[in-house]
Image (cartoon, rainbow, N blue to C red):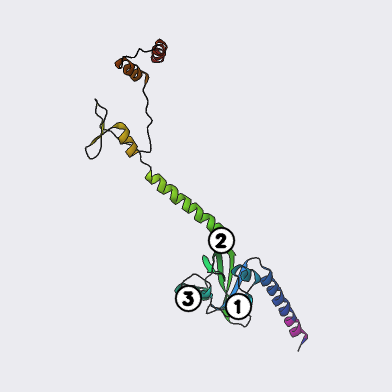
């Protein structure tokens, strides 16, 4: 073996050791698949997130923990092996059965044995997705609430004498009844000063002078 060949092998071993260290220490989840979608290797971050030990993952098909349909997985594998790079969100089933969401980057690579495979690098975005879902639920609830709010628009047919309002079916309703049915308003009842004076006079009750004076003062304004 020549000195040059020994140097090349030494450099190759050093390069492989560096790649292995990078694979092991990456904070993101890294998965190596063969051309058929079977797990060939997984870094500690992926194992920690999904709940499986590395030994348990080796030999499993990606469909074992991916929520994507088998047809979609095969289609993506074919695209990757044809030279495409994919970036999409996926949902994985953890070992305990819970679901988590990941931002996934995939590309074709040459595996250590020289065969073609897939490198998949993902980041856990579960917390972000949950916040987005909560916001979407809030928007939906607000939209539904606004759709239920009743408003009055247009011209209201009202009797000039009794002040009843005619509804769309032709029935005459008291103002209070009509508004309460067609809006979110409700009524409390009382007497305005003029009606209070008339009620007292009709009932033979003497109207206090101070009360009359205050009513006239307000009318003057």
Circles 1 and 2: CB distance less than 8 Å?
no
> Which region shows up in magenta?
3-9
- Disc number lying in front (2 or 3): 2
Q: CA distance from mark 3 to mark 1?
A: 22 Å
Which residue does the numbered mark 2 point to in the structure image? 126
- Disc number lying in front (3 or 1): 1
Residue drawn at x 29%, y 16% is 202
Is the residue marked by circle 2 packed among few (<14), some (14-19), or many (20+) residues within 10 Å?
some
Q: In this orientation, does residue 86 appear?
A: no
Near-viewer residue (145 or 185): 185
Magenta stretch holds residue 215: no
Residue furthest right in the image:
3
Residue drawn at x 51%, y 55% is 132
Q: Position of residue 194 (x, y in %)?
A: 34, 18
Near-viewer residue (46 or 218): 218
Instruction: Give the SS element for disc 1.
Output: helix
Q: Give the answer, above or below, for where 209 lies relative to 55.
A: above
Q: Position of residue 150 (x, y in %)?
A: 36, 41
Which residue does the numbered mark 1 point to in the structure image? 56
Near-viewer residue (7 or 37): 37
Which residue does the numbered mark 3 point to in the structure image? 74
Instruction: Give the SS element for disc 2.
Output: helix
Residue furthest bottom in the image:
1
User: Which mark sits nearer the N-terminus, 1 or 2?
Assistant: 1
Residue furthest front in the image:
204
How many circles with numbers are drawn on the protein? 3
Is the residue marked by circle 1 packed among few (<14), some (14-19), or many (20+) residues within 10 Å?
few
Instruction: Give the SS element for disc 3.
Output: helix
């Amino acid at each position: 073996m020549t000195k040059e060949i020994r140097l090349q092998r030494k450099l190759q071993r050093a390069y492989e050791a560096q790649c292995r260290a990078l694979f092991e220490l990456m904070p993101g989840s890294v998965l190596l698949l063969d051309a058929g979608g079977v797990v060939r290797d997984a870094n500690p971050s992926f194992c920690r997130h999904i709940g499986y030990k590395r030994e348990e993952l080796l030999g499993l098909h990606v469909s074992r923990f991916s929520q994507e349909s088998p047809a979609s997985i095969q289609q993506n594998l074919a695209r990757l092996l044809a030279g495409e790079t994919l970036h999409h969100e996926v949902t994985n089933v953890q070992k305990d059965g819970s679901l988590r969401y990941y931002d996934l980057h995939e590309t074709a690579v040459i595996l250590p044995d020289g065969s073609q495979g897939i490198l998949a690098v993902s980041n856990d975005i579960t917390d972000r997705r949950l916040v987005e879902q909560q916001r979407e639920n809030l928007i939906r609830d607000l939209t539904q609430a606004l759709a239920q709010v009743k408003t009055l628009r247009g011209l209201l047919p009202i009797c000039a004498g009794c002040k009843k309002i005619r509804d769309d079916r032709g029935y005459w309703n008291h103002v209070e009844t009509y508004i309460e049915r067609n809006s979110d308003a409700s009524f409390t009842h009382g007497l305005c000063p003029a009606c209070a004076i008339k009620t007292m006079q009709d009932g033979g009750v003497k109207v206090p002078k101070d009360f009359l004076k205050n009513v006239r003062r307000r009318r003057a304004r």
